[in-house]
Amino acid sequence: MSPIDRRTFLQTTGATLAAATLVQAPSRGDEPPRSGWRKAYMLGTSKGAILPHFRLLKEAGFEGVELTAPNQLDRDEVLKARDETGLVIHGVSGSEHWKSPLSSPDADVVKKGMAAIRASIADCKAYGGTTVLLVPAVVNPKVSHREAWTRSQERIREILPEAEAAGIKIAIEEVWNKFLLTAPEFARYIDEFKSPAVGAYFDVGNVVEYGYPQEWIRELGPRILKVHIKEYAKKNRFSYPLGEGGEIDWPAVRSAFNEIGYHGWITAEVPYGDVKAMTDVVKRMDKILGAG
């Protein structure tokens, strides 16, 4: 999915705001789930008031949220929204890695990409999250797969000590960047870091174009730090409600997650809507994933 499509996909479509819920103490994103999967929403809002969105998502039944970073949000307002609603900010998703990939041969482009990762680590730590999602490289006519592999690893290794010091893990996502196109390749890329601070952010929908999610899950196993879900079919790609009209074998996916013992955050990367629409997303997540 292109960076423009990805961000547009997540933008606000006009939400009906819900009343504030009871205040709960904030918690870090790595706490063990109280029961089954921990359901979160990928919120693409990068500026403006954040509290109304947090209230709505909490009302809909989400336990957590993932934000983009770096962003133009007021950090104090984000923390206030987190504390007021009790919604866990379990991590952040990089917003610069497509425009400024670590695989670029241009030093200025890489400099911007590295600065964005550092800012994302700082945001994530401040929010109480545990992972920064990173698309590590982009393969194109000017950047070979081998170059993308070598350059991105070198630059991630450079920033790893800073992530480890902050208590943040780098979660590598597989996406349509012509890189890490098989599960064994993805696993090897992660293993070569020899660091528990690097793992996989597995996107169930992204991999359907060239593989079967359940096979990737079993291959990646404990390397999986976090999970994104959305529906997918080749005809209209991601324009399907969760569990409806797509090509994903959700019972097989659920079984694979259970086999590897994954019971952490599962974040819905689907269009944003009013409280009724978001409540429906939560119900669909419960239906396709079960109790975990």
Image: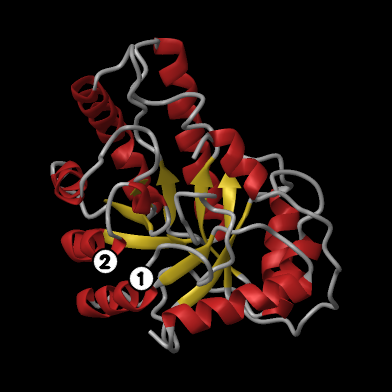
- Judged left or right of residue 198, residue 6 is right
Q: Residue at x 22, y 55 (%)?
A: 196
Q: Nearer the viewer, mark 2 or mark 1?
A: 1
Would you identify the image quadrant in which residue 84 lies? bottom right
Label 1 packing within 10 angstroms: few (<14), some (14-19), many (20+): few
Q: Which residue is drawn at 50% across and 49% down?
A: 235
Residue 65, given in percent of the width and then of the height, sits at: 59, 64
Work out whether residue 102 or residue 213 is closer to the camera in this orientation and state it.
213
- Judged left or right of residue 12, residue 180 is left
Would you identify the image quadrant in which residue 220 lies? bottom left
Q: Which residue is drawn at 25% across and 64% down?
A: 217
The residue carrying mark 2 is: 214
The residue carrying mark 1 is: 249
**Residue kind at label 2, given as amino acid type:** Gln
Label 2 packing within 10 angstroms: few (<14), some (14-19), many (20+): many
Determine whether label 2 and label 1 are within 8 Å by CB.
yes
Q: What element carries label 2?
A: helix
Work out whether residue 282 or residue 32 is closer to the camera in this orientation and state it.
282
